[in-house]
Amino acid sequence: MSGNRPFVLSIAGFDPSGGAGVLADIKTFEQHQITGFAIITANTIQTENEFIDIQWINLSFVIRSIETVFEKYKINAVKIGIIPNLHYLNRILATIKLLSPSTQIVWDPVLKSTTKFEFLSIEDRLNLNKILSKIDLITPNYNEIEILFPGFIQHQLRMQNEISTTILLKGGHNPSDIGADRLFLKNEIIDLLPSQEKCFEKHGSGCVLSAAIASNLALKQTPKEACKNAKTYIEKYLSSTSTLIGYHYVQ
């Protein structure tokens, strides 16, 4: 079906504008020469600058969809986007791990949309780290990391070894050095500095970045390589137009 292309699955919301969610992920997969699949966790009514409404997809339906895809295809990586609660996320993760323990998982913890709509509130912190241990990499921004792990920005060196997953802390909201990302590996912290590209804010940029990382992991890149190359991709995407929707094919 796909020649030698690896398979990557997006489990995320549907955004009619195509700037975020599974449509943005599929565009990103294609540009990385990945065969992409998608299972939606929510239907939304939105544009690139306005969020109107959301309907969550029943969890049992999502689990059945995951089981069907994994029974048919060898999925190399999964990117997870918006989910309504930690139980929903944990069931998805447990299903993937049962069906394919070697599949790499990237979670973009979208807690709020760029239009300030709240998707997920972290209520059960006791189970959070156990859930994160099933994930290979998460991609929070500076606002999200503080919701997930209060005090992380101030105590990041101490907290690094207390969190059971790799973290790419996105620098788009970095108040002191905008655009500078930090990759927290088990025994190393790597700064990924911005290039000189003139970038513009984009609706769904976090979706695109995490999908690019998942693509690179499926292509057997190390987490460091996957994040570094994804940063190059997202900067080209951010600089492709001055509007909130960008171009995925960038010269």
Image (tube, rainbow, N blue to C red):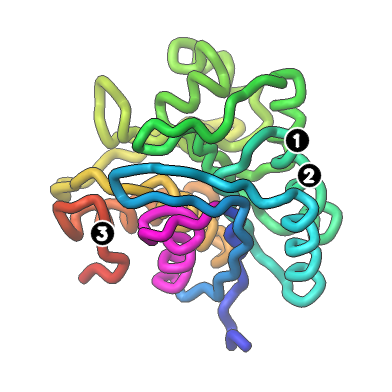
Quarter of the image with the C terminus is bottom left
The quadrant of the image that shows the N terminus is bottom right
Q: Position of residue 146 (x, y in %)?
A: 49, 19
Pick the residue in front: 218 or 141. 141
Percent x, y of residue 162: 66, 20
Amino acid at pointer 3 = Gly
Residue at image position (54%, 54%) is 43
Pointers 1 and 2 in contact (C-beta within 8 Å):
yes
Residues at marks 1 and 2, CA–CA distance in whole angstroms? 6 Å
Determine which of the numbered discs, if any, sits on residue 207 in the image: none
> Measuring 55% from the left and 75% from the top, which residue is drawn there?
35
Q: Left or right: 19 with respect to 71?
A: left
The segment highlighted magenta reads 13-32
Tell me which numbered mark, 1 or 3, is placed earlier along the sequence. 1
Amino acid tagged 1? His
First in sequence: mark 3 vs mark 2: 2
Residue designated by label 1: 87
* Residues packed near mark 2 inside 10 Å, few (<14), some (14 to 19) or many (20 plus): some
Classify 10 Å Cα crowding around label 3: few (below 14), some (14-19), many (20 and above): many
- The answer to whether one can see residue 190 in this image is no
Label 3 element class: loop
> Residue 246 — which label?
3
Give residue 180's position: percent from left, percent from top: 31, 34
Q: Which residue is mark 2?
A: 91
Left or right: 160, with 196 as reference point: right
